[in-house]
Amino acid sequence: MTDLTSLTLAEARDQLKSRAISSVEITTAHLEAIERAKALNAYIVTTADRALRMAGASDARLAKGEGGPLEGLPIGVKDLYATKGVHTQACSHILDGFKPTYESTVTANLWRDGAVMLGKLNMDEFAMGSSNETSYYGPVASPWLPPNWSHDQARAALANGKRGLLTPGGSSGGSSAAVAARLCLAATASDTGGSIRQPAAFTGVVGIKPTYGRCSRWGMVAFASSLDQAGPLARTVRDAAIMLRSMAGPDSKDSTCSPAAVPDYEGALGRSVRGLTIGVPKEYRLDGMNAEIETLWARGAEWLRTAGAKVVDVSLPNTRHALPAYYIVAPAEASSNLARYDGVRYGLREPAADILDLYEKTRGRGFGPEVRRRLLIGAYVLSAGYYDAYYVRAQKIRTLIKRDFERVFSEGVDAILTPATPSAAFGIGEKGSQDPVEMYLNDVFTVTVNMAGLPGLVAPAGLSSEGLPLGLQLIGRPFDEETLFTLGEALERSAGRTSLPARWWA
Amino acid sequence: MSVDLSAVRRIAHLARIGVSEAEIPNLQDEINAILKFVEALEQVDVEGVEPMTSVIPMRLPMRDDVVTDGGITDEVLANAPLTEDGFFLVPKVIE
């Protein structure tokens, strides 16, 4: 019998439609796979009963020849999305016990289109992290083995605090690990500085952060509201296109959500890339850059040239300011957004003598070290006397970063090709324990895209010499996700589908 | 710019995050590492540049000025740690 968890989302959709398989069958196969993969820690909650109920309802609709674009397809949901009556904590202790009485717009759109919810996925606390290590529920092990490790060695490490195993990236580390380990057909994720694209690169899957405003942020736990966007992680470019079409769309509950209709992204696949102009920005060539990443990048450009695109050098001079400016803007917005966790209305509450004591004790115990660090930075840069020097200046620099992209696009460039990450996946416990900035550097290639509100897609582009996945990023014009899907599929075709690791954990 | 120990205490209080005295020096190092990282921004020429307010140009949508929500006290209070008679309960605020 075929392994139902190894199908792509598109294959599963077609087999469900032709009734070669049932939703209950494929949902059950995934629930069993999740059970066997518990030690990876990708899921923090499994909603098996609900999944089987949804699958049964999907089968009934499919039997009548009805059903939406995602009918019967089991997916995972990042713990950042409000799911009615189901654990929603953005993997923070401060939201202890929180079960929303409402559903996020993005997940509501997925259920409207027939998708089946398998459970909630692990993530860095409040999406602040690049390795899933800041989660209150502990780190996630990547299904990819460290170089030269045996299956036995990896299983032993899994039982021993995951020491030496690789991170699946972050903040959407549960999502990327689950997609790569075939614990769902696809997953929702979110991206404030690279949290969809870096995990995609680390686990050999596809991720897209769409244009700011393409997906509604209503019901997503807020981190930095001017940067946050929803997006999918999936095993192929086609699967990501199918997911995004359902996730995106207008929403009167989010005033920053675009009213524009959502195109059929799948229709962009297979379009010719002939005549498209691809920019390669020289400022992304960092001093001391990993030679393998540089080679990968050049190879990606060559693939697109061979497919008929024109590749040109471009300049984005303010690139190097993006990451420092992000570490002012994002913490500032976070300190404002996370002010709502007060021990009064929901979540954790520490016993206290007076109201100030209640706030300080609850927030002191409820937030983990990375979140606390960023909230302190945010409070500092917004405080009297520092606001202009830090926050206003950073927002001016953001304007400069956006202008760089606007100029390049106005010169006729259709998309920009860059590396996704400075390296392949690193080990759990390997980075950021001495200096938080070491971890922040992971987002050096992705954060510019959030600062400018643009869409960015990461597709697997091959393996490193050590056998680990590496990704390339395509950056597009606002609301031109279609071109990214066209080009992403061209890269995918040239690179060949990444063969995902065998199930050593099961 | 960098912060001293008393500034760390002040910021933690502003953020309403209780931190122990023992944690303050470590937090100072971490905050100063981040402030050092963003220091280079001081050199950028931003003369005459407008600060960004909206990353994607968009008209703010308007709707009719009518009540569209409310009357869901139970749902609002459903996740509260302590409630009484349809209200959130907090420690005594006024003596």
Image: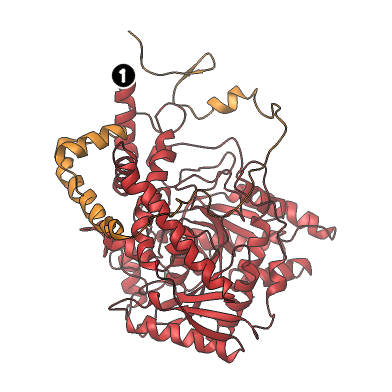
Marker count (numbered)? 1
Image coordinates for residue A8, horizontal then vertical, percent: 62, 72
Q: Which residue is mark 1?
A: A354
Colour scheme shown:
by chain
Q: Which of the chains bears the disc numbered 1?
A: A
Residue at horizontal 54%, vertical 66%?
A: A406
Residue A486 visible to an observer of this rendering: yes
Crowding at dot 1, Cα within 10 Å, few <14 / some 14-19 / many 20+, comes out as few
Q: Give the camera-side residue of A348 and A38.
A: A348
Residue at horizontal 57%, vertical 86%?
A: A310
Residue A500 visible to an observer of this rendering: no
What hue represents chain A? red
Residue at horizontal 54%, vertical 28%?
A: B78
Extreme-right residue of the structure: A64
Image coordinates for residue A36, horizontal then vertical, percent: 48, 62
Image coordinates for residue A486, horizontal then vertical, percent: 64, 76
The chain in orange: B
